[in-house]
Image: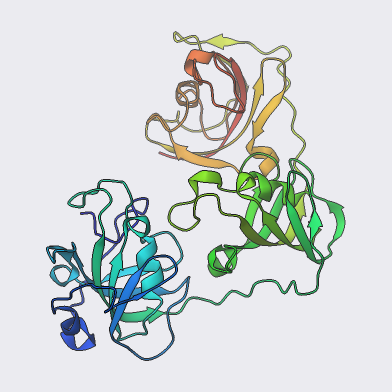
Amino acid sequence: MNRPGLNKDYPKLRILSLMLSFSLGITALSAQEPYTDASYTKTATGLAYKITCQGKGDFPQPGDKVWVHYIAKFLNDTIIETSMNSGPLDVFLGQGQIIKGWEEGIKLIQPGGAIILVIPPHLGYGNEDRPGIPANSTLIYEIALLQVDKGSRVETFNVEGKPIKKGKKKLKYILVEEGTGPFAKLGDNTYVHYTALLPDGTIFDSSRKRGEPVRITVGIHQVFEGWDMGLLLMQKGTKIRLLIPPALAYGKEGYKNMVPSNSPILLDVEMIDLVPPEPVSRWDIAGKQILETASGLKYIVIESGEGPLIQPESIVTVHYSGYFANGELFDSSVKRLEPIRFPVGVGSVIDGWDEGLQLMRKGSKFQLLIPSYLGYGSEGAPPQIPADTDLIFDIEVLDVIQ
């Protein structure tokens, strides 16, 4: 069931079974409303709202978990859906789970409060047709805020009085605190804490809320271009604020309902650790036999491994390094210090991998010579792998769950 108010990119949410009484303000929402400009306050974004009763306590902020009851309507008061039939809805603010109008409106009331929102299309579902909701619909939401679970607070960097410096491609940055040691280079593994903000100071993402840094390998397009460029300006211990133009961030597409189209991004980044990549080179196959399957897959056994052969739907953990036929390395989990885990034989990897892994055991090391039709075929995998490209993979099976 698609609940009105939920962002289309967020998966179906768990609904609490708790049924609450009308004492928190839902009764105040049930009355007919004219939805006129005279009755409602309008914000700069175009959201119109009317607080029917105010609660007590802290206003919800990005990162908080909130529980709400709601009624969704069209302008003619036709009810689209109500949570009163299914139990209150729980969502996190500032994480792209709900439409922009909800994000803005819920922050206007305290726990126990209730509000009516008149949400124009650009703060709702825009020109997209939703089940039961035509494109370009203005929607009415009657919302009662039942409970707020406060998320951990995130402090942004204090950049007052610090100079703005120019980087490449219109990237700008503010050095908040210098680090020590070598600067990050392409291929290095960095461990960073970050907080991402819109130009108005709204936090839309932060690793600090999750309590642990993230690992980013520099220069492999793991993050958007401006972030990658900023990492090259940092050492272990560096704290920096990146002022990233739209072209180096999310561009005209934006990001879910959190980052508008063509919006600059402010990114506070602290480099917790910097680890050079592991040296990687193709395995020595001198004197070893090249075997071939009926499909045209070729393989060389470096180490046989132990135990039974890997079966379809087994979960494997592997390290790999991928090369072009000329020996150029294009990808490696070894360099990233991060093996990958996936099921075998269900299409989660290219056909050459699925077939080759079923010839292997736990502890096996094989070199697979994969023709393009068992790899990425005529489409390739831009920007790294051109169309119709034969590939070579050194694969080590670290673990198998049959």
Q: Quadrant of residue 16?
A: bottom left
**In the figure, 315 relative to 73: above or below?**
above
- Residue sitting at 82 percent across and 65 percent down? 163
Q: As drawn, is 277 to the left or to the right of 66?
A: right
Question: Foreground: 168 or 228?
Answer: 168
**Residue farthest to the front?**
38
Name the spot of residue 18 as percent of width and height, x first.
Answer: 21, 77
Image position of 334 (left or right of 339): right
User: Quadrant of the image for the N terminus?
Assistant: bottom left
Question: Residue at position x 75%, y 28% from top?
Answer: 281
Q: State how many labels appear.
A: 0
Between residues 145 and 353, which one lies in front from this camera angle? 145
- Residue 354 visible in the snapshot: yes
Q: Is residue 252 left or right of residue 113?
A: right
Residue 260, how many percent across, how many down?
Answer: 49, 54
**The quadrant where residue 65 appears:** bottom left
Image position, residue 141 (x, y; %): 25, 69
Residue 300 seen in the figure: no
